[in-house]
Amino acid sequence: MTILLEVQGLSKNFGGLQVSSDITMSLKAGDRCALIGPNGAGKTTFVNLVTGALAPTAGVIRLDGRDVTRLSAADRVRRGLIRSFQVARLFASMTVREHMELAILQRDRRTFRLFASVGRTRGLAAEVAEGLSLMGLEAVAETTVGSLAYGQQRLLEIALALVMRPKVLILDEPAAGVPHSESQRILDAIDRLPKDLAVLMIEHDMDLVARFASTIVVLAQGKLLCSGTTREVLADPRVREVYLGSRAHAH
Amino acid sequence: MSATMTDAAPTNHSAARLASPRRDLSWTAAPLVGLLGLAAFWVFPEDLGLMTRIAAAALYVLSLDLVLGYCGIATLGQAAMFGTGAYAAGIAAVHLVNDPLILLVIGGVAGGAIALATGALILHARGLTLLMLTIAVTQIVQEVANKARDWTGGSDGLSGVDPAPVFGLFRFDMVGRTSYLFALAVLVVGMLVARRIVRSPFGLACRGVKEDPVRVAALGGSPRAYLVTMYAVAGMFAGVAGALTAVSSGIVGLDSVSFSWSAEALVMLVLGGTGRLYGAVIGTVAFMAAHHILAATDPFHWMAFIGLFLMGVVLFLPGGIAAGLERLRDRLTGTKSGSAPGGRA
Amino acid sequence: METLFGIAVDGVAYGMILFIISVGLSVTLGLMRVVNLAHGAFAMVGGYVASYAAQTFGLPYAGALVVAVLLTVLATLPLETLLYRRIYGHANELSQVLLTIGLTFVIVASVNYLFGPSLKRIPLPELLQGTVALGPKSIPTHRAFVIVAGAVTLLGLWWLLERTDFGIRLRAAVDDPAMAAALGIRTERLYMATFALGTGLAALGGVLGAELLPLEPYYAIRYIVLFLAVVAVGGAGSVFGSAAAALALGVTDTAGKYLIPNFGEFFFYAALILILFRWPQGFFKGKTA
């Protein structure tokens, strides 16, 4: 299988503080990988480095074989590296439909059409409807996001990420804050994703991890602690100690 | 009550109501302006000169709404584009052509070009820095216009703009009938085009940038490219408005590219309400009509009035006159919406 | 040589006035994040009060100066509570611009109503007329006085911000408002005190600078762009930044008027664009003090 995302020796210093050090990992097409680690392990920093929100101090990031380390976040998105935000980050005054329309038009690079009509763009309405039904959002299509329930905002986040046709999809705790009845929808949607894309999911809920992931990467104190298949990693005593132990402690 | 009003962001509130499932009547704005404008033509035949200036100014304020209302760029430099368009059309009229439509095109191109050039340079900045940069650009344009006396007439102004008949048929008469109807027609067309643009995929993306540029980048878009493009588009509108003023009045003065003309555009737009397009027209009519009446007695009365009014709008009526009217309509029709006073937490 | 000396003296004096007025704006912008376009109007009010006190009541220059600063601060403090407090913060730029433009218009109209449209003077005491010898050169006493006053203001502000409890709180709040609030610094009072400091400085500059920036009702609108330029170049909240920017702009502007009288403004604004393009946070931003 082709390697879609390859990270080599990725490091980041803030002042003297090393928040990510020498992380190396890769995702192949079809991978379903969970990124876990105790709070403060540097998971979010790692995602920000990969997506381009932060510039690394050292290391290389390759997307589908091409070095994207120096590209902007938007350029990486255009090359198929898509993320969903942990805390839903949406346009408060726009409707759910408008979000989907903007994501699709942006994906197809049709946003510099100054005299076209959004409503009459061919195929757009159908694709919006399809994307919304996937997350059960049809009923709130015309609602402004500011007045949407939090769980529904999360579902819209996922719907946006999916509609952008990612090659590599990074989901930052996709089910956090979503009612249990709805989180099933998210997992179903992830199950139905095309098999040739790679998914990296940051998750705390070990039930979800066990259900979703074929491989696991564990971060602790900004370093790669271990990685491997789900079974191997969950059996690793170091993981039990650092991750599960500290979580048990925290609760 | 005033406290809750001030806390709420006016923009959220305006878009929330656009999105409500009520029938979308915004297409009626341009035809309505045309009809009311024609009615005014018969009712106030003595004031055609003033009404012509209002129509051109409304187009100028509309251009600011594209930038501020749909992209969230706070600028005190819109007059740079207006003035450049006015001078370009004026100079072309004196030396080259006198067809009024071609002059409008020249003004639009000039306004768009200066907006593109300066926008690409300054739109990376935010807040006070951006305000200062837009002011500085306007002052430089004014200084150039002041110094290039041979072309612009300097502080005496550029005169001798003598446009040919519109379509070769309608002469610009002494009373100003043709001027007014021409200006009104250009304004209506401008409103239609602007409405088209804000409802296009591009307009949608600009609204996204206004709310959260980082999120737009996360969708793969380049916020700055949208801002610069919209700035240039709005520059074309402002340039056409400047050319329209030059054509209809026959003169171009240094005040058309001044700091205060920029500030007045902002005042008119906010009076009317941002992010609606027709708010720009309402604000301009209200401002310039009140100015005409009050400033005739003493310009300082006018300043006191507009100053108090402005403070009142910011404190008590964040969406401008248009939002007030919409709220009133909701009251009357009994429509429930989140914007009713006290209805918001 | 004579010209250069003239430029230096006039430029520095002019820069000092710009500094005294602008630093008040800079401090309020740095702490409360408010773009106060009415700051020039406050300076103008100070000037008018001093002029009225001196002309009508025959107060001596120093007395008129003190009365003007105190009265201006007293008159504007209610505005802080009633108006400004509603528009503090990052997200409110547009409201700030509009509200303070409105306030400026009202002040301009009121000043015109009360004092009329003609130019007002603040008579200088004999002590400040004439010239003082400085080695082989002599400079107008008033210019020398303004330069000294500017330097004293700079030192005074430095002392206030670096050496007093108020200054420590103020700097803490500028650097990190959330942290300051968490440490129990009462921001409301701090804001009020800072606002008073800002308007007091404006009034001081308005009185001292009346010879250089003549008092008339449109003063408030005419010079505000200049004060904003100083703050933008100096960096919001930076005292030394404001001083450096004000002196640089004052000397540049004066030199432009002496040497290339036709393009003075042009070079001023071109320099402004270049500086802000390269250093969007202000040329002297970096150390907050």
Image (cartoon, rainbow, N blue to C red):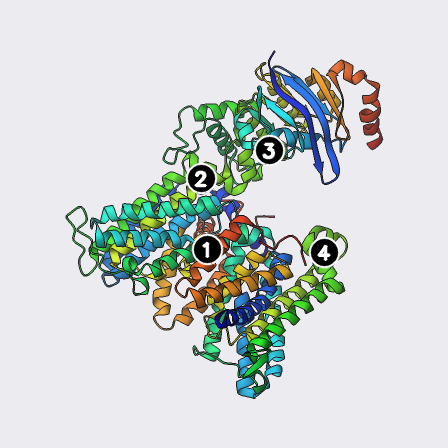
Tag of residue B22: 2
Q: Chain of mark 3?
A: A
The image quarter in which residue A160 lies: top right
Residue in the image at 51% along x and 40% along y: B209
Q: Nearer the viewer, residue A158 or C96?
A: C96
- Say if labels 2 and 4 share a chain: no
The alpha-carbon separation of the residues under discs 2 and 3 comes to 23 Å
Q: Is residue C215 above or below residue B307?
A: below
Q: Chain of mark 1?
A: C
The alpha-carbon separation of the residues under discs 4 and 3 comes to 37 Å
Crowding at dot 2, Cα within 10 Å, few <14 / some 14-19 / many 20+, comes out as: few
Residue B324 percent across, percent down from the top left: 46, 53
Select label 2 or label 4 by which is in front: 4
Select label 1 or label 4 by which is in front: 1
Q: Residue furthest bottom?
A: C58
Q: Amino acid at mark 1?
A: Ala
Mark 2, secondary structure of its residue: loop
Crowding at dot 1, Cα within 10 Å, few <14 / some 14-19 / many 20+, comes out as: some
The alpha-carbon separation of the residues under discs 1 and 4 comes to 35 Å
For the N terminus of chain A, the quadrant is top right
